[in-house]
Amino acid sequence: MAGQEDPVQREIHQDWANREYIEVITSSIKKITDFLNSFDMSCRSRLATLNEKLTALERRIEYIEARVTKGETLT
Amino acid sequence: MPLVKRNIDPRHLCHTALPRGIKNELECVTNISLANIIRQLSSLSKYAEDIFGELFNEAHSFSFRVNSLQERVDRLSVSVTQLDPKEEELSLQDITMRKAFRSSTIQDQQLFDRKTLPIPLQETYDVCEQPPPLNILTPYRDDGKEGLKFYTNPSYFFDLWKEKMLQDTEDKRKEKRKQKKNLDRPHEPEKVPRAPHDRRREWQKLAQGPELAEDDANLLHKHIEVANGPASHFETRPQAYVDHMDGSYSLTALPFSQMSELLTRAEERVLVRPHEPPPPPPMHGAGDVKPIPTCISSATGLIENRPQSPATGRTPVFVSPTPPPPPPPLPSALSTSSLRASMTSTPPPPVPPPPPPPSTALQAPAVPPPPAPLQIAPGVLHPAPPPIAPPLVQPSPPVARAAPVCETVPVHPLPQGEVQGLPPPPPPPPLPPPGLRPSSPVTVAALAHPPPGLHPAPAPAPGPHVPLMPPSPPSQVIPASEPKRHPSTLPVISDARSVLLEAIRKGIQLRKVEEQREQEAKHERIENDVATILSRRIAVEYSDSEDDSEFDEVDWLE
């Protein structure tokens, strides 16, 4: 009994250790993926806000240019 | 359903079959799991690089825009400092000649196109099974379409929407043109003098007797109502109808009034469509009330669409809306019965014989409205033919006047007509044409023959071939029916009218071809441009008439 337990126990213990190791790695992989997704989403939202501001600025500048410039004809 | 954009490849770490012949399975599983972890990390790194790449591209484009904006702001600041309030605009020309300010409204379009598909989704799509190679059959197709388009077409909805938009713009333009035309036309009908019409109507009423006249009015109203809708209000309508009859001759006037006018001016208005099918509603006195109202409503819808297209002359256009509704109800009514079925074939040729019906209507003081009234009160129908619809008038007078005789006559042709498709119309029209055309409304007795005239004759005969066969049916009908009144004049006038009608139709066809060519040219131009043009067309649709007219002019000039 003791002889049987030892190698089996050792293997099982080793297996448990391996599994815990693998579990740690997979959970960190999941954290990385979560971080990447959230980073992607936040970046996209910020870039969209930037885009909005840029568009508004471009329109204002167009208007101001039209007001300021002289000699623009229909041609 | 949310689509997974990036899927880490080895989904399960240890869901693999273990190889045989291994002593330490737990260790094997551990090693397999670790190997899969490494693969997962590799796919993760690939997707991370993709994510950052997309973000970088977007930010990079923004940097370009920001830089250009910066330059513009610098230039503006310089120019603004140089601005002097002393330098004012000298002339008005500057104000008028200046280009109107229009901000560049860039709209997002084609968002979900194949080209905008992100790379990871494209890779997922590539992993999927390809559709069957139907495009190898394309060279064997007659219509020139790609074979795969029938199986799967990613641009299907866009094409559908594009077609719909183009069609809507065209429809709107046509509507506006028609409105402009209508504004010019409403005065024409007012010119028609009322006197002759009233006299005839009065004579008819007197001839039939006061009681019958009222019934005719009721019947007329019934027919009109049936045409407009299944409601039937005998008592309330006659007064209104009579008032209408004596009242204004606007476009919205009842067809009877227009018919009567046409009869008075039958000679002048050759453009009237002779081939309006005169359904023999009286034929089936005891008929199906239900099919008639439904048929009439449907027929009216059909006919309402037609009046606009064919008529080139003013009078036909004016007349067309009214005559078509009456004839269609009649033919539609026959749909249920064998006769009805043949009659319905006639409605497609929308040119009911307006002159004959009005003449017949005038002659028949008792106006037997559409077949519905005939069915409802066969006895009441006898008094007078319904002037409402020429076709109605045609069948009604014969039935009304000589019910037994007329019924027998039409019955015989009807069975024959069933085979041909338009039997019912020809039989009743032959009867009326001879009698009533000379327009002696007082002679009610003569009304035994349904409203005569070329119009009814041509209309009933051809049915589907109405436009092409107007001369033939009258000629056929005339000898067979032996018009009592003026048979000799009928063929001559009918030929002239048929020739005119054919010319009109050809003109309409030519116009349609031209329009089609223009549309094709526009389509070719549009295909190169993206949805911007479509969005512009949307703006055109919702813009006011002024913009549309300008757009139209531009298009025409192009």
Image (cartoon, helix red, strand yellow):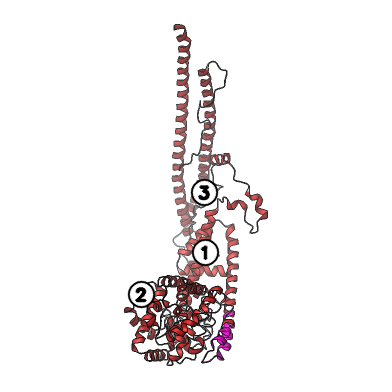
- Pick the residue in front: B170 or A59: B170
Q: Residue at x 47, y 26 (%)?
A: A26
Circles 1 and 2: CB atoms closer than 8 Å:
no
User: Which chain letter goes with mark 2?
Assistant: B
Would you say residue B489 sits in the magenta stretch?
yes
Q: Main secondary structure of the magenta part?
A: helix
Q: Residue at x 59, y 57 (%)?
A: B528
Q: Amino acid at mark 3?
A: Phe
Q: Is residue B139 left or right of residue B323?
A: right
Tag 3: Cα neighbours inside 10 Å, few (<14), some, or many (≥20)?
few
Tag 1: Cα neighbours inside 10 Å, few (<14), some, or many (≥20)?
few
Tag 2: Cα neighbours inside 10 Å, few (<14), some, or many (≥20)?
many
- Pick the residue in front: B384 or B223: B384
Would you say residue B4 sits in the magenta stretch?
no
Q: Amino acid at mark 1?
A: Gln
Q: Is residue B217 left or right of residue B392?
A: left
Q: Which mark is residue B112?
A: 3
User: Which chain letter goes with mark 1?
Assistant: B
Q: Which residue is mark 2?
A: B232
Residue B108 location (% of width, % of height):
49, 52
Q: Which residue is mark 1?
A: B167
Mark 2 and mark 3: span between their CA atoms? Answer: 54 Å
Label 3: element kind: loop
Q: Is residue B285 left or right of residue B167?
A: left
Residue B378 location (% of width, % of height):
39, 80
Extent of the magenta region: B474-502
